[in-house]
Each structure stands twice: as structure tokens, then as C-alpha cells.
Image: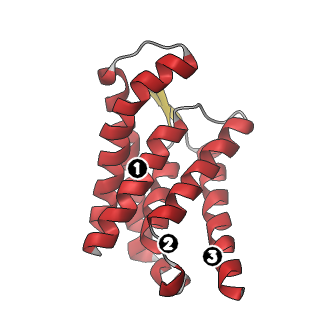
Amino acid sequence: MRNNTRLLTTMAIFVAIGVIGSSILGFQIGVAKVYPIQHAVNVMAAVVLGPIPAVTIAFTIGLLRNLLGLGTLLAFPGGMIGALLAGYLYRWTKKKYMAATGEMIGTGIIGALFSVPYANVLMGTSYGALGFIPSFLASSALGAVIGVLVLNRVNLENMVPKELRS
């Protein structure tokens, strides 16, 4: 019971950092507004907690940002795919830069490509892949670098016991 409380508390802290950070640092690149703090949180959560909690955190941040009017529906495909790939690449390699690489590929390329039909159906926009890739890639690259820098300065890996990581 105590370990579950610790995991949920850690996840809540990451969600709070993501929502507050996104309200402070967000800017327009191309056709999308970008939030690099979301991607930094994805990398940190992927390393500290693993892929499934990282995806849950990304979903929760996206949901709260949308409910608060701080984000768009594009937060879901970009953030969640990037968090998943970051978590699995870190799990397979145990290298923080691979989590950052997973975030950049997952969000910057795969998430951007997935956003094309997603935005067309749910948002009524008709941007092509080249409309989303530059902004998604720039945001995820900046956020991934921030995430790795924080991980290198603060020993977050010892924050959660290994048996709680997914």
C-alpha cells in the first residue's frame, strides 16, 4: 500500500510540473503551439517510472491542459507516443540519451504523422505531415534536452524503488 502511494505521489508531482510548466512556457512554431516542458516531463518520467506510468502522466497532463484551456488536442498523440517510446528505449538500453531519442522520434516524427488524420477528424484542420513535424520535432528536442539535463543534475532514479517501475 505504501509503495502505491509513493508511485501515485510521484506521478502527481510530474503531472503538476507538466501542467504548470506548460502554462509558463509555450510558444508557437509553425502550425502548432509547442510545450517543451511536457517533453521534459516525459523523458524524466520514462527514466524514473517506466513507459506505462509515463504514458499515464502524459495523458493526464494533456487532459488537464485541455480542460484548463492551456493546450490543444494535439497534446494527446504527441505526448503519449513520445512518452511510450522514451520509456521503452530507456528500459532496453538504460541510457538517458536513448529516452530523449525516443521522445524526439515518438513525438517529433511518429506523433506528428499520427496528428495529421487526428487533427483532420477531431479539429477540422487539413495540415499535412510537413506542417506538424517541424514544430513537434523542435518542441520534443528542446524538452528532451531539458529532461536529460535535469536527470543528470538531480538523482531522480532513486526517487522510486525499482519494484514500482513498470
Image vertical order of residue 126 relative to residue 82, above or below? above
Where is mark 1, residue-wise?
82
Q: Whole-percent x and y of residue 132?
A: 37, 27
Q: Secondary structure at mark 2?
A: loop
Q: Amino acid at mark 2?
A: Leu
Q: Secondary structure at mark 3?
A: helix
Q: Is residue 10 visible?
A: yes
Q: Whole-percent x and y of residue 33?
A: 51, 30
Q: Residue at x 34, y 71 (%)?
A: 91
The mark found on residue 139 in the picture is: none
Quadrant occupied by the N terminus = bottom right
Spatial CA distance of label 3 from label 1 is: 21 Å
**For the image shown, how many numbered marks are present on the structure?**
3
Say whether disc 2 or disc 1 marks the residue closer to the N-terminus: 2
Where is mark 2, residue-wise?
49
In the shown orientation, is residue 15 left or right of residue 162?
A: right
Spatial CA distance of label 3 from label 2 is: 8 Å
